[in-house]
Image (spheres, grey):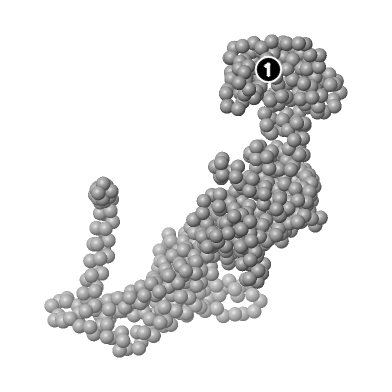
Amino acid sequence: MAGVQVSDVSRSFGAHKALDNVSIDFADGGFYALLGPSGSGKTTLLRQIAGFDFPDSGRITIGGESVERVPVEKRRIGMVFQNYALFPNMSVADNVAFGLSVRGEARAIIATEVQRALDLVQLGKLGGRRPHQLSGGQRQRVALARAIVTKPRVLLLDEPLGALDKALRVDMQIELKRIQREIGITTIFVTHDQEEALTMSDRIGILRDGRLVQEGPPEEIYDRPKSEFAATFLGDANIFRGDTTGDGIRLPDGTAIAAGAGAKLAAGAKASCAVRPERIRIATDAGAPDGTANMLKGQVSKRIFAGNNSTYFVERGGQTLKVIVQNTGVDRLAEGQDVVLRWSPESTVLIAAG
Amino acid sequence: MAAATASRSGLRSALPLLAPAYLWLTVAIFLPLSAMVFFSFMTELPLSGKPWAFTLGNYAAFFSQSLYLTLLLASLRLGLEVTLWCVVIGYPAAYVLAKVLKGRSREAIFLLVILPFWSNGLVRIFSWAMVLREGGILDTALNAVLPFKINIDLMYSYPAVIIGLVHSYVPYMVLTCYLTLQAIDDSLIEAGRSLGASRLQVLKRVIIPLSMPGLVAGAALIFVPVVGSFMEPRILGGRTGTFYGTVIEDQFVAVFNWPLGAALSFILLAVVLVILAVASPVLRRAA
């Protein structure tokens, strides 16, 4: 097992820059999610690490060994594909045995290792089946067993749960996490599903247009997004735009919003503030004045009830703000009602414009 | 009950679509073939009032004269060799067409593969005659390039027959293999390599087994007509080009012994069917 370092990697396809100077450090044994919209370069980055494609410039090391010109079959990686890519001409056991058998391992060793890998993914009894006789979730487990049986240095997953339905996906998320912990392998996981990235990974890298936008633990990216894109792509956010005052911004209509988190900016520059919908309190009256809290007045335009919570859409100065309120059984607000929104500066993240 | 009614009405509505093909097959193949079966058991052709009788003599002739068996074995060997050369030449081309080339260049190369289909068979064979004979295109070209004098005269030889037949039949192999290779998902190749297999190991363990149906179909499409071929052996092979197919042709056009020609044809048909029946399960299991 080993860590992976990607340093200043660029890759272009014709005029299109798929990766633009990307650097990420994947520590040994960690579970990483590469998150981004389609076309952001996340799969291209994974393919560079796997060795299916070589970077135009930059360095990639696995376990400290420089691999950017090493072909995939010599990199000792394990990969799980979105469509599983099981060999249809082989049984489940032969699929799992493939990596050991091309290496020329002895038959007895292959048989034990294959059985151990199938047991690990809880398919110990299905070795004799053909891939087409399995369900989607089972195929995914076989693909995982096949990828880890060779004891690779790093496990690469290309949207592995994308083809599964919602309930099965949640099961597989837990399962995948359990297996990853059990064998302690460095895992890099490509997804466009933000929830998946948040729940599964130790660290997340957000990509956009071939660039790494932000990288860090899920909590850090969620609580301290460094760009409007990161704030809105990972979770939901209300964005206010204006001029910085040093410790917040002033909206075009003169309202000041205090920010207790995020970038330190010189006064006067263009900037934005991001606030998560669940951090805002909503009430019908101003209540006792609170010197430190941010406060805005608005009108409820729409309410969406989702059982455990409700989302209120509040119109304010030409902007629609989103507020999520836990269902406590009281204080249900009607559409058209005038409301006051309050939230603390600590929940407000200052973001440099651009 | 309801299902049976539905399938019967399905057949009735499909009948107008099936009828032309089956009518044509009946008239164009089944009737003449039946007539040939009939002829093969006659002593003489019933033309111009000659007397004739039923006999098994035409079939007995095959077994009484070792020449026919020798020629049949030579033709089977020819079929095998041509099929092998078609695999060796056609399979890599099909692989490149299906897995390497994309877009315009694929279309262009494909066209070049299909081209022999669009030219007249006789013209094709005579062009080979011009290339292969002494003082022909190959001989002249090689002597123009090489510093020493060599004599290339492949005309009227076994290799010439092989060259002509491979040229005629290689497109079948390219087409059938291309179709099965194209259906193989690229991610299977990538999965194999990510598991540490070299390109050659992926080819051996994944690609060839998965494209076996195309290889088998191509081999059957080539082997059967080559065993009975007569045009290429006669024109390019000359005196060395005597095969089972040319003997059958002789019976029909030169010796005018249709009953013997028909009997020899049906023996060939039987042998080929037996070979296909034995070979196809074996090949399928290998896949």
Q: Does residue A318 appear in this view?
A: no
Q: Can you say whether A41 is above or below A95 in the image?
A: above
Q: Does residue B275 appear in this view?
A: yes
Q: Please state the horizontal and vertical placement of residue A245, each as a whole percent of the image.
A: 83, 19
Helix, strand or loop at mark 1: strand
Which of the pair B97/A140 is nearer the observer? A140
Residue, disc 1:
A282
Residue at 47 percent across and 79 percent down: it is B158
Which of the pair B23/B284 is nearer the observer? B284
Q: Can you say whether A215 is above or below A26 in the image?
A: above
- Please report, as a chain letter, where disc 1 is located: A
Q: Can you say whether A5 is above or below B221 in the image?
A: above
- Classify residue B244 by image quadrant: bottom left
- Classify residue B147 by image quadrant: bottom right
Q: Please state the horizontal and vertical placement of residue B159, each as a whole percent of the image.
A: 49, 77
Which of the pair B111/A8 is nearer the observer? A8
Residue type at tag 1: Ile
Position of residue A172 in the picture relative to residue A222 (left or right): left
Q: Quadrant of the C terminus of chain A?
A: top right
Q: Please state the horizontal and vertical placement of residue A309, each as a whole percent of the image.
A: 61, 25
Residue at 27 percent across and 85 percent down: it is B60
Residues packed near mark 1 inside 10 Å, few (<14), some (14 to 19) or many (20 plus):
many
Which of the pair A297/A255 is nearer the observer? A297
Q: Please state the horizontal and vertical placement of residue A178, each as a whole percent of the image.
A: 67, 49
